Image (cartoon, coloured by chain):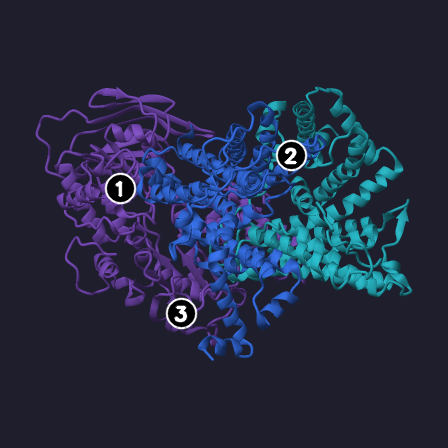
Chain colours: A blue, B purple, C cyan
Amino acid sequence: MDIVSVLYEIPIIGLVFQLIGYLITIFPTIAPIVMQAAVPIAFAALCGVMCERAGVVNIGIEGTMLVAAFVGWAAGVYLLPVLGSQPALAFGVTPSLLVALGLAVLSGMVVALVHAWLSISVRADQIISGTIINIAAFGITGYLNALISRTSPTSAGRFTSFTPPEWLTSLPLVGWLVNTLIAQGPMVISLLVIVVVFQIMLFRSRWGLRVRAVGEHPRAAETVGIDVIRVRYRNVLIGGALAALGGAYLSMELSQSFQTGMTVGRGFIGLAAMIVGRWTPLGAFGAALLFASSVGIGQSIRIAPPPGDLGSLLGALPGQFFDALPYLITIVILAGVIGRSIPPAADGQPYERESAT
Amino acid sequence: MALPEAPEVVKAPALEMRGITKRYPGVVANDGVDLDVRPGEIHALLGENGAGKTTLMNVLYGLAKPDAGEILLDGAPIELSGPADAIAQGISMVHQHFMLVPVLSVAENIVLGDETMANPIFLDRKEADRRIVELGRRFGFEVDPAVKVGSLSVGWQQRVEILKALYREARILVLDEPTAVLTPQETEEIFAVLRRLAGAGHSIIFISHKLYEVLEIADRITVIRRGRVVGQRVPSETNEDDLAELMVGREVSLVVDRGESHPGEPVLRVEGLRVNDDRRQEALRGVDFEIRAGEIFGIAGVAGNGQDELVEALTGLRKAAAGRVKLGETDITGWRTRDIYDEGVGYVPADRHRFGLVLSQTLADGLVLTSYHRAPFARGIQRNAAAIDEAAQNLIGQYDIRTPSADVKAGTLSGGNQQKVIVAREFSRELRLLVLDQPTRGLDVGSIEFIHRQAIAARDAGTAILLVSAELDEVLELSDRIAVMYRGRLVATIDAREANKNEVGLLMATGGEARAEGEGALTA
Amino acid sequence: MRARLRRLWTVIALPVLSIVLAALVGAVVMIFSEFLVRGQISILLPVNAYVALISGSIGSPNAIINTLVNATPLILGGLAVGLAFKAGLFNIGAQGQFLMGALVSVAVATQFRTFEPGFIGLLVALAAGTLAGAAYGFIPGVLKAVSGAHEVVTTIMLNFIAISIVAAAVSTVLDVPGSPSPITLDVGTAALPVLIGRNGHIGILIALAMAAVISWLLFKTTWGYELRTAGANPEAARYAGMSPRSIIVAAMSMAGGLAGMAGAIEVLGVTHHMTSSYGTTVGFDSIAVALLGRTNPLGIVLAALLFGGMRAGAVAMQINAGVPAELVGVLQATILFFIVASSVVRRIFRLRAVGPGLDEATTITRTYGGEVKA
């Protein structure tokens, strides 16, 4: 009788040990799935960081993602007959997919522009502005989707993953890491690059310093000659592009179709990830992984449940429990962390130029 | 002490502002203002709050465009389209409310907007640090560029602001009320720095409303009242009364006659009070004192030495970690705010915008904010609008609050009138203890006079009054007994008649301890 | 008389003109999307659509009854969101609270399905649904009060969780054995009595009564004053001796109760049962109603009637003019956009003295971090 079985046999606490053991064993297998589930959340969180570090609260990330998801798919549908589907280079990139992606990013920036205008120039309440965007996004994408669906559309396909050579993935320790990070589609990989670049830029570059100053004390930034309004507009637009990538990922890489409301709250989970990650790109990414892990775990339990008591316990839970798991975990972590996570000081406060005269 | 007289040849002005006029809706902030500053001169701009000093400097700094007039640098007219322009021309401003980002380091704050770069994208931290340390040394202080500005004392933040200006090789420095939050000792130190700067050829514009300081540091004084220049003086040819009359336009009694106090039984007794701040650190380290009915007990001290925590503990807004507070014979330690008020405690808070009023509510609501729940303003859960209105009308008349009606939003009133609302509300209640926290901050002379008179009247009516103020003059003027708060303890309690301003100032700055660190070192 | 009319105009001008502008934008959207998808330009399309929309909402006695029935949950939902707004909280969780109210009241009502007199079962079910909604509003309220977790994120999470709870409950415990897809029993005698027409149940009266009650509570009582003060300036509220923490919890619970009541009324008055995929747009609609109604009970009632009418007419619009009902969501958002960006409206119509836009009337954004002091 080894130590592990002994621990597992303890009446109630044993279940906890069983759970930990189970999680450890499935970890390498679910890592790629977790990574994929984390992508939209991470992009949403990065959009949040980009906006809020400059002092603009963006609740409309969900709507932005939804619009980009729709535009990416719909543009692909209409570009397919025009640009053809010659697969080129790698990642299943075709001309129609590429152009559709570009349009999706553009659409995200347009949505972001609306929010930016309402929040920065009109100086409306930023949460109300974001909510309007969400309502509008739901409405317009649902409406257009209903129209398009009547014409039996064919999608332009999707981006495919890179397949690294066999010898690389079969390496003992590194293998699953390669599988998780590199054997993925182009958007997953670009996420990793963006996180690193963003983190470095925010804390070591002149751009990052000015952004942080604007988000903490815009008046001080103005008095040293920084154009607060321009910095905020720029950041919100870039944020829109990031959110668009997250949305496009859903309809162009993870799947190749669009459903009404397919973002199912990932935009908001992204906000939670931003808070847990203390408004840093790296932290937001880590938090996104944390929230996404519940998706991986839920899937794994359904497909290959743990043996023994734990398995029967989990099997008794209705399937919907695992659907709700990501949202439950978000609440729990948010409530636990929030008190100690401090946003940029001027976050959410409309700014009036002193030199406006 | 002003610099020795300049040689007979008067130097050409480094900066000249001619005929500056600036209008805002409903008010002419600057009306044909002329100002000239010579190289190496410390020129004081004196005026009341709202006289137009800040507007004039905003024009100089490019934050506002004048409707008329011109600015000349070394005789040549310049156009300023914004602060970046002004900085490029060598004009730098140190603002009254520090323009520093607390979470960024000293170096980051200093280079912001004019960053020292290693390449087009990334900052050159080493070089920036080096330059900053060298600059500090040149003017007499050691600075650590990596410290977060938020953890610096106010005096040191002031120095960082000055370094910001020097880093950009400013020739003309504008300092807006630089000594508002400094102790007398820190003020002396800053003055030493300013004299060195002037000696090195920089021109300095020193904005203030403090008469004795202006007389001490300035080479010339320009007085502004209601947007116009009403006089220019040289310190050796004028005095405080002359300047005060120029500033206000009439003879002003600078000191309200306090009269004799006739203290009665102790109303407030504080024993061994210990209170933690928001960071769970001890801000109040065991404080004992008592206040008797009919006396004003003033606590002097630099902001941030525990006064906020003391006031919050007394009013139930913060839980004490240890100790007791007694009101008369009743132990009110740990009581809720509502119950403490109901026991006869009134509170005029320091931050009237944040605490004392709800700016989006009406004046009438503001006048009953602390008693809306009691008769006659409410019966059970139902509010009595008529009673509230009646009380509001009475108070508006009694306290001369300037407003078209009781139904205007509190946010539309001037600062002085807002404070009058709070004063009217609290002073008109039946009180045993009245807590006044910075009651006249940022107000004009007339309002200050009014509130001081009210306080003395309340004292004479038998109320015990606790006065907390960073304005040493106010404490000296109103209090019957004075205590000095330093690092969470009351380090001295003096009878006001024996109080000496310099002594008290010294206690505020050092707490009576000998200076442990060397002069000019950074106190985090 | 002239002065009175002018004052009335300044108050309603902005909403009315925003609706007009939104209708124009909607028309452009319809024409443009028709062109994009089918390559034809049909100028008449918006005309047909709006005619169908209007006739479906007020064009016949049946339509009017439909409008009132659709407006009922919106009044309560709008009150739920508006009450929270006044307390400085953004209750996006109306949907989840609605669902929980519906679920619990169905569960209780089916126990009373043959009980006579029916109104007892009705009252018990209604109360149970309201309490369930209140409990579901209590959760984010207490989380915010104790840990500072921002209610925007927590309520949206709870919305999705509620969907799962409903699906799970209806599929397992409440499911009628032998039914092809998960569905509960009918509520039987516990249903809301019908007042007029085929389905004009008395829920509308309950909703209007609640609007009056909330109005009284907010503006005539000390409790309402405390709520509004805590919403406007929580620090001043503390200074004044109030307890923002308990106000937050109470406000969210009350808001949840109102939304739960809406859910209970929908289920007891309209559908009479529940399926596992019971869907509703009430969540977002309530927010739109609250914002359009400027968070005041009277405004909310009017806005609810407008949006209720739009929902009622949307079905007709889809059937008769072939325009997907989702367009209503677009119209709603556009109306809100113009209300928020009131300066645009003012410039277009060259107005001068128009009532304050939303930006001046409501600002509730507060940052995420930090505790709420007691």
Residue indicated by mark 3: B292
Q: Which mark is residue B110?
A: 1
Can you say which quadrant of the picture contains the C terminus of chain B? Answer: bottom left
Callout 1, which amino acid? Answer: Ile
Q: Identify which residue, B348 or B87, lies in the foreground.
A: B87
- Choose between B142 and B239: the one closer to the eye: B142
Give the percent coordinates (x, y) of residue A262.
61, 43
Front tag of 2 and 1: 2
Name which residue lies at 18% across and 41% down: B131
Mark earlier in primary sequence (3, 1): 1
User: Which residue sits furthest left?
Assistant: B7
Q: Are marks 2 and 3 on the same chain?
A: no
Q: Amino acid at mark 2?
A: Ile
Q: Which residue is mark 2?
A: A140
The answer to whether marks 3 and 1 mark residues whose Cβ atoms lie closer than 8 Å is no
Q: Which label belongs to residue A100?
A: none
Q: Is residue C78 above or below residue A22?
A: above
Instruction: Give me the C-alpha separation between circle 2 and circle 1.
Output: 48 Å
